[in-house]
Image (cartoon, rainbow, N blue to C red):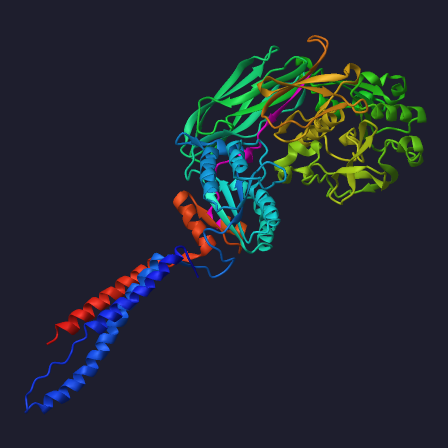
Amino acid sequence: MTFVNPLLLAGTLLVAVPIVLHLIMRRKPRHLEFPALRFVQKRHESNQRRLRLRHLLLLLLRAGAIALLAIALARPSMKLSGVLGSQESPVAAALVFDTSPRMEYRHENRTRLEAAQQLGLWLLSQFPQQSQGAVLDTQLGPGAFQVDRGAALQRIERLETVANSQPLTGAMGEALRLLGQSELACKEIYVFSDLARAAWPTDSAGRLQSRIAEMPGASVYLVDVGVKEPTDFALGDVRLSGQVLSNRSPLRVRTELSCTGPGKTRTVELYLLDSDGEPQKRSQESVTLESHRAEQVEFGIGSMEVGTHQGYVRIVGQDSLACDDTRFFTVEVKPAWRVLIAAGKPAQTYALFLTQALAPEMFRRTGQARFDCRIVTLDELAGETLESYAAVCLLDPMPLEPPVWRKLADFASDGHGVAIFLGRNAQPVDSFNRPGALELLPGKLVRQARSPEGDLHLAPGSSPHPILAPFGKAAGSIPWDDFPVYRYWQLGKLADGVNVVVPFTDGRPALLERPLGGGRVLPMTTPVSDRPNRKPWNLLPVGDAWPFVILTNQMMLYLVGSSDRQLNYHAGQTASVTLDEKARRRSYLLIAPEDMKFPLSADPKQNVLVITSTDRPGNYRIRAGGKDSGVDLGFSVNLAPEQTRLDRIADEDLAAIFGPAEYRVARNRNQIDRDISLGRVGRELFPILIILIAVILAAEHLLANRFYGER
């Protein structure tokens, strides 16, 4: 037990007052001379013993009331566990501020970060002398104790939101590590947060509980600066039909408009930047939202000129959180990719299914096909100049001469793509197991596997490979069993670096990927060129074969380097921009949002520019040389959606994050002061003592009136 005002305990000496008064005011016997009153003497002795007991009881009540009053004024506190301290003992304190973008939410003309700063500055001034203070935020990096209180004040005043904020559980772990270095007995952590669910991931709860358990004397205080019922409209991630497009393909821009709080009708606009960087409005959509619901918003833009195009989607109007009202995007438009398809005779027949999937007849006539397919026979392949093509496809190839295999390997090594669909013409097997062919194939061909019952089919599963990205959420509902595979090639030991993209239902590889130099090879162990009336190896391209169309298009986009190119990033991610080897420069200029400019130097050994300064959302541009003949590239950066989600964590979920660890939640100065008192010196007994004093005084009053009122 400790006392806030121990000097007032001297008031317990006043218990001597009622004792002295009782001794002074004690009744003295009066001498009356009545010769015939012996019985009165006996009665007197009996009453005297009873009066002594009553006087003693009143004395104890009055002395107890005075003693308890003195003790109550000294404000005793009791702490049953932890480190016992006092309000004036120095502490090692870590102040952790949530600096995620959602802390820019404005309420009562203050952002949540400004509210946290005001409470933090006040709290820092309340710490006892000789205390150690550390101010941390949710930006990645180690923390440190400030040299003095003035430095800590400046650190709080200069806090700003960061685009790639880490969870508070990680920041608290760093604070606990820092407090472990202090020799002070009393250790405290203050976390200033809006208690948004996104800041408290459950997957890191175990690590946080372990760190707190390693420091049992530390007190944890959560200072809630959030709004209990926030209101906000927000845009989700921008989803593009492709980050690298053909100039014959339209651009589809999709996003999600969500509502936190009461619903309302909002308008979303799409802007594209012109050659001078000025925004031009291209489309808009009005969406009516219900409370706490989300709706999809989609825009379509026709074919665009070759080059890098940037734009943004925004919500019209203002709300309490502006940073989630705009999303930026970048697309790169290229000429239609030339694809060379080599097949056996008759080549047009063999290539029918694949060419119709890549460049449908209707699209070719209207000039909308993104692939420009040229069909040749396998015999003509040796005389073709491959440099003008983005990819080469071999349909059910027969044995090729070593120079042809060498030519294809060099083509892939130079950064291009080769697809090989193995079928019935891969005879004799030994000709495909020679060194020249094995430079492209994933392994040696062993035998033909058969499944005449038709119970074998492709089984992509949930692979994260870019080729399978369009199947994503619908992976479990795609009717692959409607397209059985009756025969395929079994392979021996796979070469180093080979990756299985799509297996069959029996676990054998169906589609594989083999990196080769700067390019890649996609071998498939069953063909896509058989006709149904020739005892086909599979039924992939027939019937309602939309999975086949998507799969082959994704394969070609991956081979030409479209599906794996990334031009849109979340804040904090490292951006990688591919350079054209024919137009490389020694230095480049990076133009960041708010017209900030930085010089960049290219690594002569690499064909990419690496940019790590992506902490500002917006459109980034990379330029070198003149406007007409120079380099003009770009990429975009957006906030991750979880950085702006305002839905608050439930009390039971927060309790699950901390587990057995004790913590206290406060929302204003009075609650913070109360919690600090409980944490440092325990629970105050003042209210209990005052109630007890009132009970004692009431009992004393009743007894005194009864005893002294008797005749």
State the image coordinates of residue 254 (x, y, percent, origin top left). 56, 26
Residue at the spot 49% in from the left edge and 58% down from the top edge: 84
Residue 257 on the magenta segment = no
Residue at the spot 54% in from the left edge and 15% down from the top edge: 282
Q: Name the image quarter holding the C terminus.
A: bottom left
Q: Where on the picture, by quarter, is residue 304?
A: top right
Left or right: residue 701 versus residue 132 is left
Q: Name the image quarter holding the N terminus.
A: bottom left
Looking at the image, which is closer to me, 493 or 142? 142
Residue 651 on the magenta segment = yes
State the image coordinates of residue 526 (x, y, percent, origin top left). 79, 35
Q: Is residue 267 visible?
A: yes
Region rendered in magenta: 632-653
Looking at the image, which is closer to me, 300 or 21? 21
Looking at the image, which is closer to me, 477 or 204? 204
Relative vertical location of residue 55 with respect to residue 450 in this rendering, above or below: below
